[in-house]
Image (tube, grey):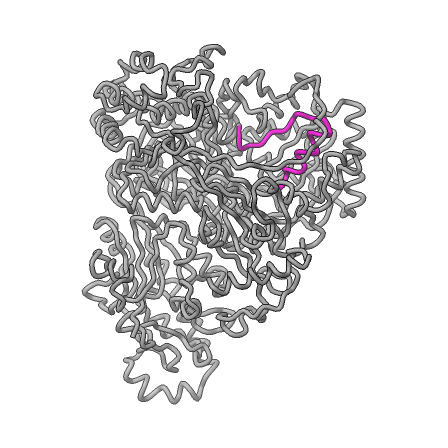
Amino acid sequence: MTHGVSRRRFLGTVGAVGAAVTAAPTEVKAKGRPPGWRGTDRVEKIATNCEMCFWRCGVLAEVADGRVLRLEGNPDHPLTRGRLCARGNAGTQLLYDPDRLKWPLLRTGARGEGKFKRISWDEALDVFASKLKDLRQANGPESVAFFPHGLAPRFFSTLMKAYGTPNSAEPSFAQCRGPREVGYALTFGHELGSPEPVDLEEAKLIVLIGSHLGENVFTSQITAFAEGLSRGAKLIAVDPRFSTAAGKADWWLPIRPGTDIALLLAWMNVLIAEGLCDREYIATYASGFTELAAHVRDFTPEWAQPITDLPAARIRETARAMGAAKPAVVVHPGRHATWYGDDTQRARAMAILTALLGSWGRKGGIFLPTPVPKGSFDLPSFPESERGRADGAGTRFPLASEELGVTNGLVDATLSAQPYPIKAWIVYGQNVLESIPQRQRTLQAIEKLEFLAVVDVMPVEQINYADLVLPEATYLERYDPPTIVETAKTPFISVRQPACEPLFESKPGWWIAKQMAHRLGLDAWFPWETPEQHLAQIIAPMGINALELRNRGAVAFPGRPYLEDRAADAGTPFDTDSGRIELYSNRLKEIGADPLPRYTPVVAPPEGHFRLIYGRAPVHSFARSQNNETLNALMPENELWVQARSARALGFNDGERVRLENVDGVKSQPVRLKATEGIRDDCVYMVHGFGHRSKGLRRAFGRGASDTELMTRVSVDPLMGGTGMRVTFVRLVKESASR
Amino acid sequence: MARFAMVTDLRKCVGCQACTVACSAEWDVPTGYARTHVRPTQISGTFPNLVSSVYVAQCNHCDHPPCVEACPSGATFQSESGVVQVDKGVCIGCGFCVEACPYDARYINPATKKVDKCDFCMARVGRGAQPACVATCTAHAKYFGDLEDHSSDVFKMVFQGGAQGLQTRAVSVGPNVYYVGRKEHLDLIRASFPPRQPRLPVAGEAWTRVLKPLVLAAVGATFAGQAVAFFTQLRKGEQDFED
């Protein structure tokens, strides 16, 4: 890496004399490359962070003559230390994807028809701003709902708050981590956050409950997972499917889907009955142990056996393994947690198990975030909405995050015009037709809108329904707000900065937000001219050098990840009402919910149907990456896992194309059947994100099947609004018969 | 003299394909081809007693490389450090080495019409970097180093840690790519992806003595045609192999 470092140092001097970091062609001899490599020897390296998913790994972009030649991991990045996954390595194929959105588009045909005319940015922004002014005038600013995701829309989020709408919702809450954040916050007083603070490399035992690490790849978490296993950590994988992780596990528990809470209660029963809990830790930090012990007294492994379809002896054996390894046990909190509608309670059960093992704040368990001081601007306060939020966060869904919002709550409000009419959506960086289940409802809601604006990089499904489309620059072409990660053992700040100029007429999000702010008379909320000035203000209290940060891509701070590091701190480490770990939750009792988690049966598949479960592949991110040339070649379509005996009994062959039909008669696109022993016979599995319907995605169009499309029913978590999505039941239909 | 080797730790590898993509980006491998790639095994056994693993396919830099024997032009050679390399300037793209390789680790690049394969990233190693696949491996599951260096990870894994090359009694070519892991996983990848018999169209000796001058004289059309034919065969062969 000596060359990389010296080249970046060289860049530093460029920055010092005032040039922007933006790919100013720099004469740097790239020694060590084969002669004629990519036809040029003018190579420089720009440090930034990745957005092929949302883990924000450190990247070095090798750039010559304004073209990004290759990406590699940034060895100076404190979290990912030079490693990049398949998607991260394939980032240039997003940058140079010929299907990208290239210029602003204004709809000319009917909604859904996909007819647009190319317009200039000036015209696009004028149309956008005048529409927002009209809506504010006629219906109030709350009539505009915002659907962001990721780092890029953060500046636009500020704009929307300044404009006066509280209605903003990301799928990362109600379709993903929401129940987990709520369940852990109820128990320990603060949310887990992302990356989740799991001390996998120090763990003696790792418990995965539905998590399929390995297929779900977040680089640093895979590194830590593999490190833990190679240091001898035992692994329990609870999954109806024989996942990659199950293939590495010491105990694979192929649980009946939907019965995880029963298993968790039985584990607690064994830990308490056999005295395997961390009693000193519980006495020091926790409250509600007596109530919990009484609550789980009857939930023995024998009770759980017929529910979970797991042998009682196996449940007991795994509980004892946890007791023996405590406190160095990671009960992985998972990530996508919206499964059955009782998900906050399942997260609570996982949090309580973690507490019984004394793992929270302990080496090899869940470590603690270390706060990093952040600078901010002295902005005018945002206007208060008298009408409040429309998505139900804090009202209909009492524990939902008001920061992240409830996407499906906004769909509901748009459809019902309750509590007040929603007239416009601005969708930025998410694909609402793929990220939110019940696509038909989402489409009906879109039909009711006066205005739909989409800011995106690729022509994903929703583009066809948009009135206005704004092409955003990719992560390799733009500045985003800096990333400050406190949930790392060494917390850090990292930057996203352009490796090259935006292609076509695409524009970075910060520029779009500032342009709109100017047109809407909201400049006061953007008191900076350039992203560099914004960055300087954010890092002001950190005692770090902006140039160093931009040259290295990231700067780390000392962490205090364990309770033992904080022994001398005043106050309690638990930000709950009681200041203790709340095994028994008074907060839940107050709102009429179970103060201790309870198992309630979930709906079983009707005769002749399977439960549809879904997950991820290491080479794709959600529904975002299927059009990437490199990743598409590695996995052009998904396949449907079916238990081999079931497939045989139904007359299906391995490799045959089938369609899925749900109980409402919705059929999927054809998908290749994988007859395998590696799954239970009451469910089928596919990777999410395929079956694209947008013709603009020329590689991904029509390849594989979409699980989202089949989710016509969901089970909503009454506590936080999450859409439980593992309640879809399907039968298999011969492809020839389905035409 | 160095003796380079690579080891994949199957306990750590999750089959994420980071290596595949990093390698392709490093070496401009055309879409649909690979110098290295990860192939999961089928899930073996009967529910719920199952085994699965992953196989990381690449050139094995054999001690006795059949590809070198098969190469009529001398483009494929073995360096003193054991690394099997291709001199692209000499390669005629005939594809005999592709046929000869027991690990199906070579391909003809459709753009350059030359053979391509893993060379342990000698260009990177030469400037002190790790091979691209090793540098990016999300699980730190891949190790590269010198078997002559007794302090190296690869030495320890191969000579003390039970790492095994993928060879059989029938095909014993001395691979320098090793796998370490649980016995059941090693057994499964050996059963799933056994090296095949090298296909040498004519005995290597005959090539060298009799045909080589002819070959060198008739560079081009004949062999290009054969290469296409062999390549097609190879693709078919691979499919059969997977089934």
User: From where the camera sits, is residue A520 visible?
Assistant: yes
Which image quarter: residue A581?
A: top left
Q: Position of residue A510 (x, y in %)?
A: 68, 43
Instruction: Say which residue appears at 36% left-offset and 52% top-offset.
Output: B140
The mark total stands at: 0
Q: Is residue A185 magenta?
A: no
Q: Position of residue A351 (x, y in %)?
A: 38, 25
Taking A659 as reference, is A694 left or right? right
Q: Nearer the viewer, residue A615 or A382?
A: A382
- The magenta region covers A152-173
Which image quarter: residue A217?
A: top left
User: From where the camera sits, is residue A600 visible?
Assistant: no
Instruction: Say which residue appears at 39% left-offset and 79% top-offset.
Output: B75
Above or below, B81 relative to B205: above
**Quadrant (top left/top right/bottom left/bottom right) for the C terminus of chain B:** bottom left
Instruction: Say which residue appears at 56% left-offset and 46% top-offset.
Output: A544
Above or below, A547 relative to B124: above
Q: Nearer the viewer, residue A579 or B216?
A: A579
Taking A640 as reference, is A549 left or right? right
Instruction: Say which residue appears at 69% left-offset and 33% top-offset.
Output: A378
Q: Position of residue B182 (x, y in %)?
A: 23, 49
